[in-house]
Image (spheres, helix red, strand yellow):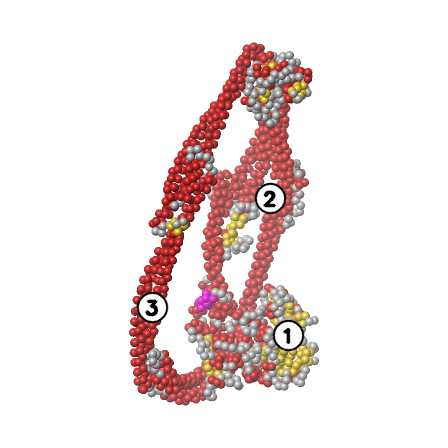
Amino acid sequence: MRIAGDGPVGAGDAGLGVPVAEGRWQPTRAGVVNSWAWAEEELLFADGWLTLAGPNGSGKSLSASMLVTVLLDADVSQTALSVSGKAAGTLLSRHTDRDEQQDRTGVWWLEYGRRTDGRAVEYVTTGLWLRAVGKAVHRVFFLARGRVGEQLRLQVDREPVRIGDLAAQLAACQGQAFTSSASSAAPNRARLSEHLRVIGDEHDYRRAVREELFAPLDEVQFDALVGVLRSLRSVRTAEAISAAEMGRLLSSALPALDSERLTVIAQAMERISELEDQLERARTEEKLLQGAERAYRRYVEAVAVVEAASLITANTGFDAQTRRERQASEEAQQAEGREAEAVELLAGTRAEIGELEGRKNAAEEELRGHAGAVLPQREQRAVELAAAARTAAKRSDEVGAEAFRAEGAARDSADGVRSAQGAVSAVSGPLRVVGGRLGADAALEGLLALDERLVAAEAAPVAAGVVDGACAAPLAWVDTRLSQLRKVEAALGDHATAQGLEVAAAADLREAEGIEETDRATADQAGQMRALAEDTLLEEMRQWADAAVELRGPALELLVRDGRGDGERLPVGKLTAGLAQVAGEARARIDAAGHHRQAAADRAVAEQAAGTWEQARTLWEQELGAAEHASQALRGAQEEAQEQDAAEQKAREQHQETHRRQVAQAEAAVAQAQEAADGAESAAVAAWEQWQGLVGVWRHDAVLIDVGMVPEPAGDGATVDAAQTVAQIQVALERAHAAAAGRLERAADAADQAAGLAQETVRDLEQQLEQARQAAPVPPAPLWRSRQPVDGTPLWALVEFAEHLADGARDRLEGALLVSGLLDALVRADGQAVAGDVTLRPGAAVASGASLADVLRPDVQGRIAPEQVHQLLRSIPLDPSAGDQFTIAVATAVAPAGYQARFIGRSARERARLQHVASLEQQLDQAKGALHRAREETARARARVDAAAVERDRFPSPAGWEQACERWQGLLQALQETRNRSAQDIRLAERGLAQALHALDAAAARRRTALELLAQEARHTEQVAATALAAARTAEGAARETAGTAAASHAEWEQAKEAQVQADAEQAGFPLLEPVSSAQQQEDDATEQLQHSIRRTADARERHRRAGEAVRQALRALNRVADAGGGTVLPADPKAADAHREDTTLMFRQVEAWRGAARRVIDLAERARQDAATSGRWGTLAADAAREAEQAAVDSGREKAAVEEMRRLHGAEYEELRASLQEVTGALGRARARVEELQRAKERAAADSASARARLDEVAPLRQAAEEHRDACLTRLGRLVDEGLALVGEDISTGPEGRPANLTAGLAWARHLLADRPTGPGAGVGADRLTAASRARDSALKTLEGAARTANSALARFNRQIILTNVSGTGWQRAEVADPAAARGQDLRAAVEALRAAVAQLEQDLRADIKKAIKTSMFAQLQRDVQVRQDLAQQLVRQIGQTLEDVRTGVARVGVKVEWAVRKDADAKAMVELVKSPPSDEMFERMYDVLRQRMDESVGDTWADRVAHTFDYRAWHEWTISVTHSSFSDGGSDRFKEVKPRGMNPLETLSTGERRLATMLPLLAAAWSMYSGEYRGPRLLSIDELDAAFDDANLRQMLGLLRRWKFDVLATAPSMTPVIKKEAGQVVIHQVITSGKHRVTVPWLWQGHGEAQPLTLDLGLGFDDGIVC
């Protein structure tokens, strides 16, 4: 937006946007593009004046602060941005209008113009380019000799200019750009460098502005000027402004120390402090880590010993497996030979068995038809019956003994019951007595009734719960009674306590009444003494009044006449006040002090004038010599600076060469690491290909494992997923083996199961054969039957076929009896039925027709008498016409088809037995053959399972590739670390180069500053000499005039002094008031004491009354709790109550004892009843057993007699046949035994062979595993070297990685490691040695963990921890030192070594000579800086004083006078003397001590703040500010009053506007002083809220003063009215208008008269001296 005039005054004549002043810079225009609420705004100055008018919140103050002072010194801190000087909002928030997420570009600019002598106009534009991105703001300050809209275009197509385009425009007009050196500003710096050769640092912007616009101000003066501008800007109103606040504002206007130099000193001090802290920390940390480091070394040694012992043990195991493989091979060959021999012998023996079986069959046929064929069965039957008789007799004895024991137990139980009943009676008797004594008969009634039941001779059974019910009532009674007794005891205690309190209260009451009487007498006496003292005083006062001379007047008469009324006390205080009033009136009338002050003031003025005269003459002579000395110093410094510039140029070249060399070294290290990583990658690929080939061979040779389930390795092994591929292959291998093993295991289990079934079949057949050889077969029994020998005899054992029956009839008859169930039915002599069985009862009626007696006859040797058996057979009818059927009543039984008789008749049973034996022997041979085949199949199946495991274990291991890959990954990590290290080295080199260059630049800047200071000093001394000469002449006239005034004032003071002495003597002679005051005080004290006694007596009487009431209440409570109800009262006497409690407790114990005894009686009675029942049952069983034993003995005798008779009739011939059969059977048995033995030998040989082969197959993978284990142990031993845990000895050959070169070298190193260990009994050998070493390692690890925990508790304050991490792939622990949140740390041993090196380096860095050199270099320059600024400040204060001397406002002649002097406190004086001291080591040491003390006191401050505060010379001085006002003087000369921190503040007597004037005048004078002399720059001022607190007259006075002093003013105001004053002259007023969120301005022109004229908006781009083209 372009502005031009459109009114009664032409724009060109108005001078808008162009400089008016001659020969100096003036602000001409300003503007903003797309920042805050501004879119695009251009602001015009008229003759250097611009006012922004708008209401609060319109942004006028914000905009003014951005133009002045941000565009002067580039300070964008929150404090600098704020008008009030307090932090409030960041530059980012201001630029984006608090929308910090916004991406926004904008520009602020301020233009200056200057007219030269030839009327030519030149312009300079300062500006700030802003870019907000991602909550950060990028800024570029610029300075250009050109104008916005002509050489500079800050907006293109309504878009803010880009930084590259701005750089191009700056380059075209020889402009400069300045930006931050931080890394975040690198993109902007890069774009700027495309067009500008030099890009300055942001801190250099202020220097460029100062040199371009504010010459000849040096850096210090410019800092002071900016401080004055900021202080003046913050002065709005002076509401309750204090002297301290005014002093702070004035101090802020004085030049501050160079912040960069303070930063350098702070950094040096911080570095020294950090080094000292680091040294102390390093020493402490090293001490804390030493214990853990020693434990870690012992642990590492123990780990190495364990790995060495593991290798030795693994090598020994490999040798043992080799020997086992050799031994298994030999055993397999021997077993195969024995198996072949056994097969040959087995064939011959089986041929022999066939021959013997033929002979045996013939002998059996012959023997089977003989009459004595049943003799063996009868003999066996006799043996069985004899054994049964012995068993029955033994059982009878056992049952009898048990019956006897049961009878004894029943008697013991009965005795126990009687004893327990006695115990119950022993308890219940005393319980009844105690209950009667306590009155608890009703509670014990149920218990005593139960007691009578329990002690009765024939007690009925009682449930256990009845006892608890009987005890519940007495126990509840006891509990209730004990609770009542506790209440009684508590009430007794309360009653006793209340009685004690009542007695004490009575004593207190008596004592209080006595004290009250005494105090009453004392009070009466004190009243009499007070009245006497007052009468005496009144008489003395009348006498004094008559003699007074100076102390006269109405007040004195009133004082003496005013006595006391009747009954009133004399008012001593009023007398004192009256005397003081009279004396004060006399002192005011005499005014000796005023005369003295005036005389002293006049004398001081005269002396000061004389001294000033003398000082001015001396000062002029000194300043004249100082000017000559300063000129010489300037020439010497210029020559020295030229020499140092040449030396610094050489240093720059050396630093750059060092930087290039360091970068080259870092890049070479990266290249070397890259080459090593590439080689390791090739090795990994080769190892992968080798493993792929081995896997292919294994897949080709695999038989049992399904190779289709195992994927082939693909790729080159160098990809990221190669390790995953290996893992997948290994998992697939395990799955394939698991599938194969499962299949083979199932086959082996099936074979085992088949062998088990075959073995079970053989065992079952052998048992059956053994039973068949010993006894004849019996009919099959049904499932439900469980028959015992004593139950009876089956029918088939008691009968034989009739001789006339043919064999077929016999078969049909026995088959029909078997089907009907009669064949196996029991026959008992007593006819009793047996559970689960069929019993035939002898003695039944004889059948009417045919019966079984016709076809069967009794066996005379049977266990039942033949008569009874015959009678039984006759009772069973038989239908002979039925043929092969057997009919009983309605049931008909038919024999099974082809059935042969085998149970009836001894011969038939023997024949059946022999046939059964032959059949079982044949089945047994077949079963044994099947068992042998099953066992062979099992062995083969198990061998296949083992072979599958071996096949899996033979899968090639990827360990070689994994090691190569691990080494490759390690080298890649090392490459990355090298890259990081190299990048860090390069950054450090660049940082070092930048620091070195910055140090050289700083040194050059310091030299330039020193030269500027020396030049300024030279100019300054010349000006001071001229000023001193004029001051000396003025002082001479003033001294003569003030001498006469001082003599007159002294005479007046002498007269006033004599009158005041007389008045003081009269005042001192006034009668003493102390006796009256003392008497009144004594009366007051006695009265107060009496009142206190009265209150205490009343309190004691009340306490006594309350205590009596408490005793009565306690007694009533005692009676209430002692009432037990039912007319029973518990004893209230303590002893009786204790006895009652003891009886109640005794009753409780007796009830508990009775309950236990009663329960025992019930339990014992129940047990006695059970024992009696048991005894009866055992008696019955004993009688039955005796009868069965007797019957068994009879049966055994009968069978034995029958066998002897049969032997006598058929024994000889039958024995011969049987002997022959036994001989053949024996030979057959021996042959079969040999077959079994040979079979077993063959099986053993085969098993031995299979076992040897299995062992051989087992040993082979074990040997391979042992070899792999040995190799793994060797690898682990070598990994100790890789992990940096151990080093191989020099006498052992090693590979390029430092590992043992081969197995032999590894074993030698292992033995070397073990040779250093103890060889005592605990050390062991082999596995024992490994175990001992492992224990030692574990112990060392525990020690290390304990040491780490101990150290960590102390290392926590260093934010360091010892962490134990697992070494990948091992069980080792690595001790590392790291931060708690770090993933990796530094090895503990390396950390300790690094700490030791750091301690040595820090001790080297902190040598005394280095610290001395640092302090000397720092503090020498600091001292000079402080001295220069202090001198400049004093000069500025003098100039301010001179400027303000004649400045008075026209309304009330308000004026200000300021003085600046050293504070009176010791610290300030010491600091001033320290700075003035000549440079020396002692002085520098004192400065260092002062600074360190301040640092220790201000721990929370930054180092720069500490240094600035310590050496801020402004804090060593204080301001004396005095103001004058027309109301302060009596019409004569101005009278100044000092503004003091405490007491009456003269500013409070001024109006608000006058207070603001008084505050602003010193600051305006300071600015005017800086702008005076040869200054040719802009005379800038920024005043916020111009009219704040000013009335019209004061505002006009201020505007006129600003115009007289020719200031360029940027002001803000709430409206246009304050500026429309004649005194303001020509000014452009931009009225700020709010449009939504945006701001625009309406420009007005005020020319000092008439009306303000609006300025039109012109969109043209051409200006020519302010006139629109």
* Amino acid, disc 3: Ser
Question: In the image, is residue 828 above or below residue 959?
Answer: above
Q: Secondary structure at mark 3?
A: helix
Q: Secondary structure at mark 2?
A: helix
How many circles with numbers are drawn on the protein?
Answer: 3
Looking at the image, which is closer to me, 25 or 1192?
1192
- Give the residue at mark 1: 1634
Q: Earlier in the sequence, mark 2 or mark 3?
A: 2
Can residue 126 be seen in this snapshot? no
Q: Residue at x 61, y 66 (%)?
A: 100
Question: In the image, is residue 273 above or below residue 339?
Answer: below
Q: Cα distance, mark 3 to mark 1? A: 80 Å
Question: In the image, is residue 761 above or below residue 1158?
Answer: above
* Amino acid, disc 1: Thr
Magenta: main secondary structure: helix
- Give the residue at mark 3: 1093
Rendered location of residue 29, percent (x, y): 63, 77
Rendered location of residue 1133, percent (x, y): 34, 51
Q: Earlier in the sequence, mark 1 or mark 2?
A: 2
Q: Earlier in the sequence, mark 3 or mark 1?
A: 3
Give the residues drawn in magenta, as a range.
1489-1498
